[in-house]
Image (spheres, grey):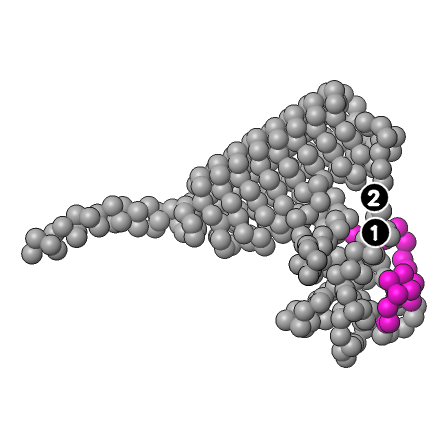
Amino acid sequence: MKFPKPHTLKHIADLIDCKYVGDANFQVLGINEIHVVESGDVVFVDHPKYYDKALQSAATIVLINKEVDCPKGKALLISDDPFRDFNKITQHFKPFQAANVAIASSAKIGVNTIIQPNCFIGNNVTIGDNCIIHSNVSIYDDTVIGNNVTIHAGTILGASAFYYKKRPEGFDPLISGGRVVIKDNVDIGALCTIDKGVTGDTTIGEGSKLDNQIQVGHDTIIGKKCLIASQTGIAGCCIIEDEVTIWGQVGTNSGITIGEKAIILGQTGVTKSVAGGKSYFGTPVEEARVKLKELAYIKKIPEIVQQLKNK
């Protein structure tokens, strides 16, 4: 998430009321999660296990809960609660904007696009040409939709990430300030839910087709010409490469990659990253031909046991 304009390290430190290490005029361009950070970004870290990863990342400002040596060319924001203060920055630059109309005045809707009754289209949404948005679709703020996109009834684009920190008093959400981006020629079925990124984009690539009742988690990137069947749940921060086929009732772990042209058979649990160009099945996921052989062998166990008893 980039800021509308650059800010100084001191300004951000004053905003969250914390100490800083580095030049007061050090430039801060935005905030991002560790897997998408760029130069000029703030990244937060609050566990010693991840200190080195954050300090050595592409981020040039590290919001951290311990005073450590500052890497050359970077700056630190020293906070007693980086999670809380990361949320403060998000709330400051991306505050929630309440709506009082069904289609926000700041929304941009292309030519020949049809919006059916009872839809909600939030602030700064962009919808391209020749789209059909069926009834009762909710499109949250800042969503970007390309040309020739069809979205069926009841689908929701841009709900918050399912990302919480456990506190003694309960669960504290990491506030989502990212977007959903739908590329050209995408079809999205009824009752799908596509969560926005925490700081970046959740993206559905050009020409991909989603069936009904599919969940796509925050910051996930789905490539071009993917085919995803009903009741699939894709967790946050996944990469689904081009021309992947995912059949019904598949679930994934977060942060995995499914390689180009892979086929995931129904009811598979994708527990790890898998290479492209192969078919997969089962939980934990294995190549389909291997897993199906295993199942065939398992069916023979009673016969083998009986043979052993008869010896």
Q: Position of residue 273 (x, y in %)?
A: 51, 54
User: Which label is found at residue 96?
Assistant: 2
Q: Are marks 2 and 1 in contact (CB under 8 Å)?
A: yes
- Image position of 82 with respect to 244: above or below: below
Identify the mark at residue 18; answer none if there is no mark.
none
> For this view, does 202 lie left or right of residue 123?
left
Magenta part of the chain: 1-20
Instruction: Please state if 185 lies on the left or on the right of 25 as rendered.
Output: left
Mark toward the start of the polypeptide (2 vs 1): 1
Q: Tell me which residue sits at (66%, 59%) in the image.
A: 166
Q: Is residue 11 magenta?
A: yes
Query: Which amino acid, mark 2?
Result: Phe
Q: Is residue 114 visible?
A: no
Residue designated by label 1? 91
Residue 157 position by quadrant: top right
Residue 267 magenta-drawn? no
Quadrant in which the C terminus appears: bottom left
Q: Residue at x 57, y 45 (%)?
A: 234
Q: Is residue 47 left or right of residue 303?
A: right
**Is label 2 in a helix, a strand or a loop?**
loop
